[in-house]
Amino acid sequence: MYHYDGYDQAFVAARAAEFRDQVNRRLAGQLTEDEFKPLRLKNGLYLQLHAYMLRIAIPYGTLSADQMRTLGELADRYDRGYGHFTTRQNLQFNWTQLKDVPDMLDILAEAGMHAIQTSGNCIRNVTTDAYAGVAGDELIDPRPTCELLRQWSSLHPEFAFLPRKFKIAVIGAAEDRAAMKFHDIGLTAYPGVDGGRPSYDVWVGGGQGRTPRVAQLFEAGVPFERLLPTLDSMLRVYNLHGRRDNKYKARIKILVAELGLEEYRAEVKADMEGRDLSVFDVAGAEYDRIAAHFDIADVPAEADVRLEAEGDFAAWLDQNVTAHKLPGYAAVTVSFKAPGAIPGDATGEDMRTLAALAERYSRAELRVTHRQNVVLPFVRKADLKALFAALVEAGLATANIGLTSDIIACPGLDYCALATARSIPIAQALSAQISAIEADARAKGEDPSGPTINISGCINACGHHHAANIGILGLNKAEKESYQITLGGRADENAAVGEILGPGFAAEEVPAVIARIIATWREHRTANESFVATYERVGKAVFKTAIYEEPLHVAA
Amino acid sequence: MAKDKRLQGPSVLTANEIMTGAIVYWTGDDWSTDIAKAERAGPDGRAALEEIARSEEDGNRVVGAYLMALDPATNLPVLLRERHRLAGPSIALPSAA
Ligand code: SF4
């Protein structure tokens, strides 16, 4: 993985020192909140419903064992002993005190981390496939591109005050495991022609929130040397024309829809033609330097192992272990979705356990997934049994990755200042109910898989509800929580936005509604048909009838 | 504003303490984390509390000061969001498990 050089280290240390000075001036009364707010937001510090919240960047979700241990220490020392992994592959602390933030940022800088651009109208943390660099089906590791984009976009002076926040995802495989088409800009990288540097398909205008959109293809086959010039001009045209009068119309998806893709493309081209692009000449050598950090040629070869497995270990191998590029290795996903757990929440102790297990079994490297779990990317197959035993011991061996009980949920009204309803208790109730059904199916030798469920506590859609097979959106109806259901969304390479099923439900009704939706799918599915395939074939009306025709009989 | 049903009952002044971010309520001469100690204002007393909100923010003691309406029947905040803000997270925190 990438390790900071002297330049990166000096950059984050200087930034932490700058913020310490800003906090001191704020506490001394030399800066008003109006002056201070944009500064704290540039350093990931929000004021949430109950307290300040610090969002720490985990660039493209990759971190070292030392960095994970540092996060665990921060959780115990400065927070209430836990943190929350987000759908942006970041980590946030919910109970941060302003006076502690300078020390926290120093400790992070020391560990090669920061909270820069995790908030505000700038280019946010670039996300990617959590199995990048190790996935068996990968065309090229997308992370050198992600790191290049991190360096290009960090404190980019022209893009510090965009019309709105800007999210970029990069993938390097045909299967999209990063919801790439729900990003302002999405890139698919594949081996290029010039000396191993990639070429890219560039997608634009995807996004969730109030106006969900699947990205459109901006240009296919962009060679490496045109990547940064293209992205720079795409951002410049957006910066110039993106709306600043209405924050709901300020994302690039709206600009592309209003201008039309053709016109937007023409403007970007004109901008590129009028510029001196020689500033980007350094990108190639820098890419090569970065790529060397991700090279896995030194990973010792391992003989392939056939594993004898039964019971819980077999279930865990089925669900949580992913095929690896290298023979004799596997990628293991540790679930933070135990029955009734809070999706993505990990204690300081969990983080220290993960750090120790990564050191012992995964070349001291970890990944955070956008589905709020953690990956150990380099496990020798011969070690899987020992790793499983260690995870059981730590209470981290839930075998449900990719199953319905692997629910995404945002913090919602339990933490978030923007929320209209709670997400977490809904996720907890559903995960308890659905985990039991999955265990039962497994015991009968049946396939436990089913639709994905994602939950957001407001229309901002941090919980990716639009992109779920079953999406749940918490709303406020006359000061009561009400949950709107969408069906048929998907976050993969065939990305689609879910359709609203009908009128919303009370919190107590949601588990019965979801059970009915799943039962309806089971009733209509042909052998092994996925939820979305059935939904696309039979249509919404079948589900609508099943849900609304008979009363739910749920005690309020 | 006067048509707003919310503002016909009592209100309290609330904010976040600048240093810790803790939710606090104005007691009449200081801030407290305990809403039971909060000074309540009827429709006539609101202007004075708004004045205090401004001066306390200007003095950099708190941030985000505003008047929170209470339901006279239940003594709870009128708004769902504020009921949750007052009660804290409705879930067991992971570290307490
Ligand atoms: S979706 Fe809404 S409630 Fe959930 S984290 Fe985002 S802004 Fe907060």
Image: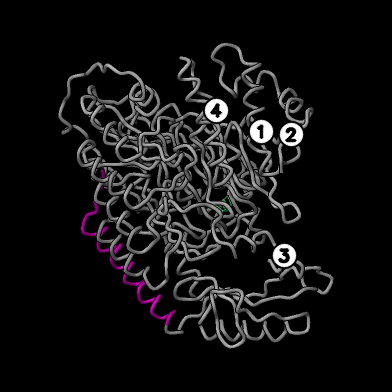
Closer to us: A509 or A465:
A509
The kind of residue on which mark 4 rests is Asn
| Quadrant position of the C terminus of chain A in the picture | top right
User: Is residue A16 located in the magenta-colored stretch of the structure?
Assistant: yes
- Mark 1 or mark 2, which has the lower sequence index? 1
Disc 1 to disc 2: CB gap under 8 Å: yes
Closer to us: B41 or A533:
B41
Q: Is mark 4 within 8 Å of ligand 1?
A: no
- Cα separation between marks 4 and 3: 44 Å
Q: What is the chain identity of the residue bearing mark 4?
A: A
Residue at the spot of label 4: A494
- Mark 4 or mark 2, which has the lower sequence index? 4
What mark, if any, has residue A7 been given in the picture? none
Nearer to us: label 4 or label 2: 2
Q: Secondary structure at mark 1?
A: helix
- Cα separation between marks 1 and 3: 29 Å
Q: Where B27 falls versus A250 (above or below)?
A: below
Residue A162 makes an appearance in the image: yes
